[in-house]
Amino acid sequence: MKTTRLYLANDTSSLAAGAGRLAEVWSKRPEIQLIRTSSRGAFFLEPMVERDGPNGREAWFNVAPDDVSRILEGVGGTPVATIPFLRQQTRFTFANFGVTEPLALDEYQKRGGLKGLAAAQNLSPEAIVEELRLSGLRGRGGAAFPVWKKWQVAQQAQSEQKYVVANADEGDAGTYCDRMIMEGDPFRLIEGMMICARAIGATKGYLYCRYEYPAAAKAMQFAIQKAREADLLDCDDDSFDLEVVVGAGSYVCGEETALLESLEGRRGVVMAKPPYPAESGLYDKPTIVSNVLTFATIPNILANGGAWHGSLGTEGSRGTMALQLGGRVKQPGLVEIPFGMTLRQALEQFGGGMAPGARFKAVQVGGPLGSLFPESQLDIPICYDAFAKAGAILGHGGIVVYDDETNMVELARHFMAFTADESCGKCTPCRVGSVRGREILERIQSGLGTEADLVLLSDLGETMKSASLCALGGRAPYPVLTAIEHFPNEFRGRLKV
Amino acid sequence: MTTRHNAKLAEALESCRPVSPAKPNILKMLLAIQSALGHVPVNTLPQIAQTLGVTEAQVAGVLSYYSDLRTQLPGRHLIRVCMGESCMANHGGRVFRAIQDHVQVAVGEATPENRFTVETMSCAGNCAVSPTVMIDEDLRGRVTPSDVPSLLGPYK
Ligand SMILES: Cc1cc2nc3c(=O)[nH]c(=O)nc-3n(C[C@H](O)[C@H](O)[C@H](O)COP(=O)(O)O)c2cc1C
Ligand code: FES
């Protein structure tokens, strides 16, 4: 019998969209050979099924089990290379997505994998850091700190033991690129961590994965096992020991010092810096904590040279950014593009406008601590400097669009309640400020608030911004205050007259 | 306490007993126990503290800090509704209310016949296919309030 090879993503979101049901039904049909790949990230088209065509892969969108005959006959497919959402992207870090089987090491290698590590092995540790300096890469976890500076500190620190830690806590709601990398291209993350280990002289690494990502943790464990069997974790005479550790549901554990506390098994409480983890981190040893996307960006930089990366993007924001579109856009999904496009362009070109029947109200960039932008402010370029100038953050690249049915007072209350729930309690502005902030917003919501409450909220916000120990308290006022700034009537209309 | 329960507990305790030079790791121990028993019974604190060589207060401190650690056994099926911003923007709050109306129980408590416990959860990374509801290990996306009865039906 003639068998046809069909490609179907095994990504968590593809499964949630219905890919699991397709796999279940089709696995019983002998004429179908099902290959489980990563997802291309065009989630609005999922479940998406592909097969090989004369000019590359062809795809069928939003597939139901009964569509199988059409697909097997080859009727109605769209060449993947012509899908606008994908064609207009610049995929480097996400080049393998939708193409390879996540745990096939040979495929990873065939598509350029491990070249960065090989290049790093021919360079001195100092030369690796120099490539990163040339690349202009800044951390993708939120703080956007230059990667090379951090690595240099850890490299120059004298210690018989150093650590590499991948921050896979991905706490910002609305973000999922780290999850995609761990599930879809895990060897890229391992390769990035190994390059870091070589640069700073570390022999032990951890991956701290959020509790909500069981599939990602499992994929990483498998990939580490495979890498070990392939002797990939051997560097020079030492072997690099890599372990997956799962957290237990605390947003603040994504903050690097709290994460290290949690890795040691304690309450994940934020510590004052300095010392920075690069000087004294896990078990008081020099430790690089970097975001999953940051590590996954590094193999290409070593393979193609720092200057290559430094030529992409804008002045202070080099390379590509993984935007993660969510909320009420028509086309939610992962978008990798060089920095510089405006927010409006990104929402129109990739987001495809609003979901059917929905009208735009505001967009939040950078997770639950990110600012809200109204229609009139969408022409801001997506890069670190422009966002910093606007008092906003790109954070980890989460973009959530709200429609006109969103109640801004309720949303503002939700933000403050989130901080009140998640505060680690170490510093007073965050611990007490967030609770007071929530109470004020609840008062306004119940119709008992006054003009003085809005003034109080603004004062409170200023105190939290300037006096909090970490960005949880420091950024928490932004979404609330930008909501009041752009939608004042919704708040004023609720005040007691 | 059944023998089976005790054996599982003993195994979890042993798996996290610190072997020098490794330091005791309280969180790892609590997660191991929760994975074995479905929750961390408060009466296991003395044994945990003793096995790790730390104080009971330290164990209790960690146990109360992390929202995914539970001291009560949930119902047979655990429904978790995402309260992250993408799910909120897609009106996941309406799905949450529909679920609550359907199962008629307060957040965190089990239904009388112990079938369901409903909880909120933070972002599942399924934001592009939201709103998200997780039932036991099954993640569901694009859930609408009218899906709720058929969604919960198969979980007996
Ligand atoms: C409250 C809070 C939560 C954070 N959560 C995360 C997270 O989930 N993932 C992450 O990579 N960084 C997070 N960060 C940033 C980390 O502290 C740290 O800057 C980052 O992991 C460094 O990696 P990078 O240089 O690659 O960005 C968080 C910071 C704060 C203040
Ligand atoms: S916000 Fe609900 S899955 Fe991300």
Image (tube, rainbow, N blue to C red):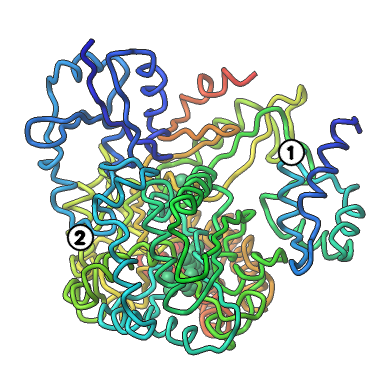
Say which amino acid is labelled 2. Arg
Callout 1: few (<14), some (14-19), or many (20+) C-alpha neighbours within 10 Å?
Answer: some
At a point 64% along the width and 60% down the height, the residue shown is: A421
Q: Is residue B12 left or right of residue A189?
A: right
Quadrant position of the N terminus of chain A in the picture: top left
Q: Is residue B120 left or right of residue A102?
A: right
Q: Residue B156, relative to residue A386: is it above or below?
A: above
Q: Furthest residue to the left? A: A54
Q: Position of residue A153 (x, y in %)?
A: 47, 87
Label 2 vs label 1, nearer the camera: 1
* Disc assigned to residue A136: none
Callout 2: few (<14), some (14-19), or many (20+) C-alpha neighbours within 10 Å?
Answer: some
* Disc assigned to residue A344: 2
Q: Residue under label 1, please give it.
A: B38
Quadrant of the rendered image containing residue A91: bottom left
Q: Residue B57, relative to residue A44: is it above or below?
A: below
Question: Which structural element holds mark 2?
Answer: helix
At a point 47% along the width and 33% down the height, the residue shown is: B140
